[in-house]
């Protein structure tokens, strides 16, 4: 795909963003999702209250801890007094003026709407969504013991990486089948439970084919190092954009670095638009060639050269896992055959020796 200087310049003008990302680097977890080219909110907006641990939101949810803060919202651990259970409560994050801007409010409302139509074992369920006064909120099930993917990635082998990616892709396939595109698939939007199960989270930038647009024409949404070429150059979003995000996440898991790295936002954009990523094996990742091809196909520049959607990516991951099991089974079978053959020859030799001894004794 040819580089688009205009896209690159607009990307840089609106908000530079840090691009370094390696395992264990705190800047990765702190990087914000950015909105590029969106029309600024009208003056005013909704005055936001500052929420603190111990406060009770909507007369029901008592805040017990802040779990995380992103570009669009803040997530708190909370106690549901009515349901008598722990939950995760997401509130819109105020803009630089201290007010809740229209786009952020609309996106949180949208996230609640979409979450209530998505029910899958690899998507954290939405328990409640609504508005308290002028402030929208979304309540998610609390997943005890779950940690962000960057916190556990260092200790994973490639098979564990593939199993996690299969989970994420399966949840995303459920969304794609219902016309929902996530638009911000990246490592820190994956949670991993103590049993090795993965959840895809944060549908704050998601869109659906049957809902009205929130984003202004020409806007670019996403986390810069993880954005697909067509999103940067043309503002296009469809299932292949999420496949690109799956490819970025898998590449990062296998190598410890993002596929596209640069010293400046301008260089980063050009890298994404023009350069093919280094094969993981070239960076020292000891992975099967089939897995390397899978990862690089998900990062193809042209959307039509990638897997068409998350279901196709998931199936490719499953095929890769099954192929390795099959090879392992064949190796075990061949070893067993060699052992059996050796045993037959040994038994035949013993039998021959006995026969010779008997013949000599008779003579």
Image (cartoon, rainbow, N blue to C red):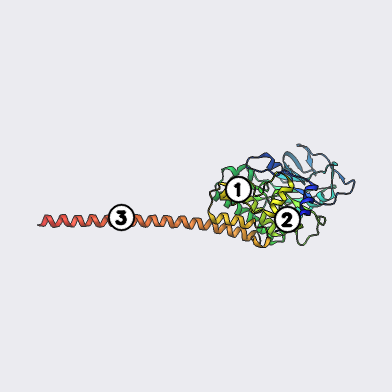
- Whole-Å distance between the Cαs marked 3 and 2? 66 Å
Q: Which residue is mark 3?
A: 343
Which numbered mark, 3 or 2, is in the foreground of this view? 2
Please name the residue shown 44% across and 58% down the image.
Answer: 330
Q: Which residue is mark 2?
A: 3
Which label number is shown at residue 253? 1
Packing grade of label 3 (10 A; few <14, some 14-19, many >=20) is few
Q: Quadrant of the N terminus?
A: bottom right
Q: Earlier in the sequence, mark 3 or mark 1?
A: 1
Work out which residue is located at the far right of the displayed protein and give it.
43
- Label 1 SS: helix
Work out which residue is located at the far left of the displayed protein and give it.
363
Q: Are marks 3 and 1 in contact (CB under 8 Å)?
A: no
- Label 2 SS: loop
Q: Where's residue 247, x and y in %?
A: 64, 53
Which quadrant would residue 58 be assigned to in this image?
A: top right
Q: Where's residue 131, x and y in %?
A: 81, 49
- Whole-Å distance between the Cαs marked 3 and 1? 45 Å
- Whole-Å distance between the Cαs marked 2 and 1? 27 Å
Q: Quadrant of the C terminus?
A: bottom left
- Label 3 SS: helix
Examine the rendering and report whether any part of residue 108 can be seen: no
Left or right of 326, for residue 68? right
Examine the rendering and report whether any part of residue 335 can be seen: yes
Q: Earlier in the sequence, mark 3 or mark 2?
A: 2
Q: Earlier in the sequence, mark 2 or mark 1?
A: 2
Left or right of 350, for residue 92? right
Which label number is shown at residue 149? none
Q: Where's residue 159, x and y in %?
A: 54, 50
């Amino acid at each position: 795909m040819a580089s688009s200087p205009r896209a690159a310049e607009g990307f840089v003008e609106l908000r530079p963003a840090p691009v370094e990302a390696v395992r264990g680097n705190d800047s990765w977890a702190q990087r914000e999702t950015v909105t590029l080219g969106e029309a600024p909110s009208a003056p005013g907006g909704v005055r936001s209250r500052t929420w603190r641990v111990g406060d009770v939101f909507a007369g029901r949810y008592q805040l017990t801890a802040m779990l995380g803060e992103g570009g669009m919202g803040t997530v708190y651990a909370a106690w549901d007094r009515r349901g008598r259970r722990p939950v995760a409560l997401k509130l819109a994050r105020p803009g630089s003026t201290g007010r809740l801007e229209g786009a952020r409010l609309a996106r949180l409302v949208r996230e609640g709407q979409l979450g209530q139509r998505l029910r899958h074992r690899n998507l954290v369920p939405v328990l409640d969504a609504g508005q308290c006064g002028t402030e929208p909120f979304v309540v998610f099930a609390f997943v005890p013991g779950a940690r962000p993917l960057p916190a556990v990635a260092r200790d994973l082998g490639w098979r564990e990486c593939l199993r996690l990616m299969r989970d994420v892709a399966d949840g995303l396939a459920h969304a794609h089948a219902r016309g929902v595109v996530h638009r911000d698939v990246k490592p820190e939007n994956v949670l991993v439970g103590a049993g090795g199960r993965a959840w895809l989270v944060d549908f704050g930038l998601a869109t659906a084919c049957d809902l009205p647009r929130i984003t202004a024409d020409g806007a670019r949404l996403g986390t810069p190092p993880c954005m697909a070429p067509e999103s940067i150059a043309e503002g296009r979003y469809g299932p292949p954009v999420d496949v690109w995000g799956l490819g970025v996440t898998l590449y990062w898991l296998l190598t410890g670095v993002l596929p596209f790295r640069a010293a400046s936002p301008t260089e980063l954009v050009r890298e994404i638009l023009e350069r093919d990523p280094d094969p993981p094996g070239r960076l020292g990742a000891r992975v099967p060639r089939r897995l390397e091809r899978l990862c690089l196909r998900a990062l193809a520049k042209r959307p039509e050269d990638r897997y068409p959607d998350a279901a196709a990516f998931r199936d490719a991951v499953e095929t890769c896992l099954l192929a390795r099991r099959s090879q392992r089974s064949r190796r075990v079978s061949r070893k067993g055959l060699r052992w059996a053959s050796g045993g037959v020859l040994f038994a035949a030799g013993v039998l021959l020796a006995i026969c010779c001894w008997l013949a000599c004794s008779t003579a």
